[in-house]
Image (cartoon, rainbow, N blue to C red):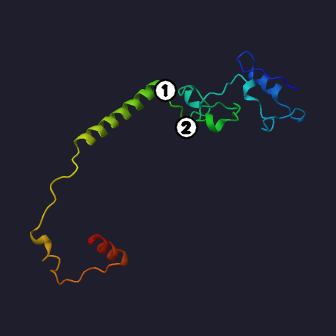
Amino acid sequence: MFQSNPADDRKKAQEAEEASEDLAGGNEDPNMNGNYPDPTLTSALPVKRQFRDPYADWWDPQERRNYGEAVHEDNDVLGVFSPEAYTHFSTGWGGVLMGSFIATVGALCGIVYNYYPDRASVPRTYPGGLEAELGGPEAPRAAMTEADMRAIIEGDK
């Protein structure tokens, strides 16, 4: 069986690719990748393209690749069009920022809770309780259900 060594720069990429390729299909392919050259054996370690020098003399400047460079089997994750690795600040500083935000929102909620009035003012009263505006004592009332009638009757007791 083929023994693989971890990738390092001591081995030429061409030698590693030739050693890992088995076109006859005699070696078992545990990853089922069609005997694609094992990228861990080449000197080209998987590096996200965003970390490659954008000003270098690339054959494909947009993807930052050279002609004939083997495409890594995880190219969809390593390519330029994949989501970029977030390197703006560390995890610890992100926790500090998130904690500061939560503390600020909590303090603001506490201040509003302590000073927000229950009612804006005293409920307004009208002379006669708006009897005339609502049609007077002879105005037709809304239809009542039997549950409403029972509630009125039971409330009078």
Secondary element under disc 2, as helix, strand or loop, is loop
Residue farthest to the left?
127
Q: Is residue 133 left or right of residue 55?
A: left
Quadrant position of the C terminus in the picture: bottom left
Lateral position of residue 101 relative to residue 140, left or right? right
Residue 90 visible in rendering: no
Distance between the alpha carbons at the discs numbered 2 and 1: 18 Å
Looking at the picture, does residue 78 appear above or below residue 44? Answer: below
Q: Nearer the viewer, residue 84 or 92?
A: 92
Residue 120 picture location, percent across and down: 18, 52
Is residue 55 placed above or below 138 in the rendered structure?
A: above
Residue type at mark 2 is Pro
Give the residue displayed 32% in from the left and 77% down from the top. 149
Q: Nearer the viewer, residue 156 or 5?
A: 156
Quarter occupied by residue 108: top left
Label 1: how many Cα within 10 Å (few below 14, some 14–19, many 20+): few
- Identify the residue at image location x=67%, y=32%: 67
Image-based side of 44 in relation to 141, left or right: right
In this orientation, which residue lies closer to the viewer: 89 or 23?
A: 89
The residue depicted at 14 percent of the width and 72 percent of the height is 130
Q: Is residue 64 left or right of residue 145?
A: right
- The quadrant of the image that shows the N terminus is top right
Q: Nearer the viewer, residue 123 or 72?
A: 123
What is the secondary structure assignment of the residue under circle 1?
helix
| Residue carrying label 1 | 91
- The residue where tag 2 is placed is 83
